[in-house]
């Protein structure tokens, strides 16, 4: 299970759109000690997890803005990473870890997605089952049956598209559609959304 947020240059699958929103680190979750377990990875420059912005209480969770961390700004006074720039633009395509959990069942076994499909929704999930570097799952509810904010939808990555007509490597589209019937946290491409909100 990933214990750190993804880094690298391929996190950004599209160059936009970009709607940057400056937020305080304390107002985004699940990161660092602002998570249910208090053990999520801490944000550092070069990290680009998908996060929710705002109050985590049950009354508001399903309505919160979500977005991808674009940059982390160091506080010049005390050296802490105090400000975060989050891209809240709908339509941005990124790569990130997604857990294939579909439901958490108190006193029963959880269920898992074994055949994910393009267009399947993914959510910001603060459940303790997820690795320290994972903020997304396929479950609309967390382990307490609270709403998980919608983050976006699975889509093909650039290197999964069928592009034989362009002389590319794939004669047909590929997509990871065979996962084990257990918790799997792997990289998918996601079309981010806030399209249902008036921003």
Image (tube, grey):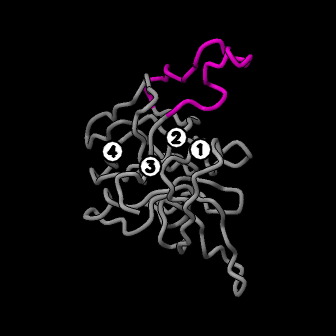
Residue nearer the viewer, 147 or 166: 166
Q: Is 145 covered by the magenta stretch?
A: no
Q: In this rendering, is residue 168 above or below 98?
A: above
Quadrant where the N terminus lies?
top right
Q: Give the structural element (helix, strand or loop) at label 2.
A: strand
Check disc 4 and report the residue beneath it.
140
Check disc 2 and report the residue beneath it.
190
Check disc 3 and report the residue beneath it.
193
Residue 18 located left or right of residue 177 = right
Disc 3 to disc 4, C-alpha distance: 15 Å
Q: Give the structural element (helix, strand or loop) at label 3.
A: loop
User: Which of label 3 and label 2 is nearer to you?
Assistant: 3
Sequence order check, earlier mark of 4 and 1: 1
Check disc 1 and report the residue beneath it.
94
- Counting from the top left corner in percent of width and height, residue 99 is at 48, 38
Q: Residues within 10 Å of mark 1 (few under 14, many from 20)?
A: many
- Counting from the top left corner in percent of width and height, residue 126 is at 43, 54
């Amino acid at each position: 299970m990933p214990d750190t947020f993804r880094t690298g240059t391929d996190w950004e699958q599209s160059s936009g759109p970009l709607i940057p929103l400056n937020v305080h680190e304390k107002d985004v979750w699940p990161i660092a000690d602002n998570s249910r377990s208090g053990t999520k990875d801490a944000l550092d420059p070069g990290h680009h997890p998908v996060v929710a912005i705002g109050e985590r209480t049950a009354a508001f969770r399903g309505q919160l803005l979500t977005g991808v961390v674009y940059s982390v700004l160091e506080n010049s006074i005390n050296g802490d990473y105090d400000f975060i720039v989050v891209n809240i633009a709908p339509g941005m395509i990124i790569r990130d870890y997604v857990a294939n959990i579909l439901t958490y069942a108190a006193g029963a076994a959880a269920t898992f997605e074994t055949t994910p499909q393009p267009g399947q929704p993914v959510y910001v999930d603060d459940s303790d089952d997820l690795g320290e570097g994972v903020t997304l799952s396929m479950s609309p509810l967390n382990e307490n049956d609270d709403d998980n904010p919608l983050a976006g939808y699975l889509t093909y990555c650039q290197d999964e598209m069928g592009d034989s007509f362009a002389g590319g490597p794939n004669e047909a589209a590929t997509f990871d559609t065979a996962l084990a019937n257990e918790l799997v946290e792997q990289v998918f491409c996601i079309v981010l959304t806030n399209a249902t909100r008036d921003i």
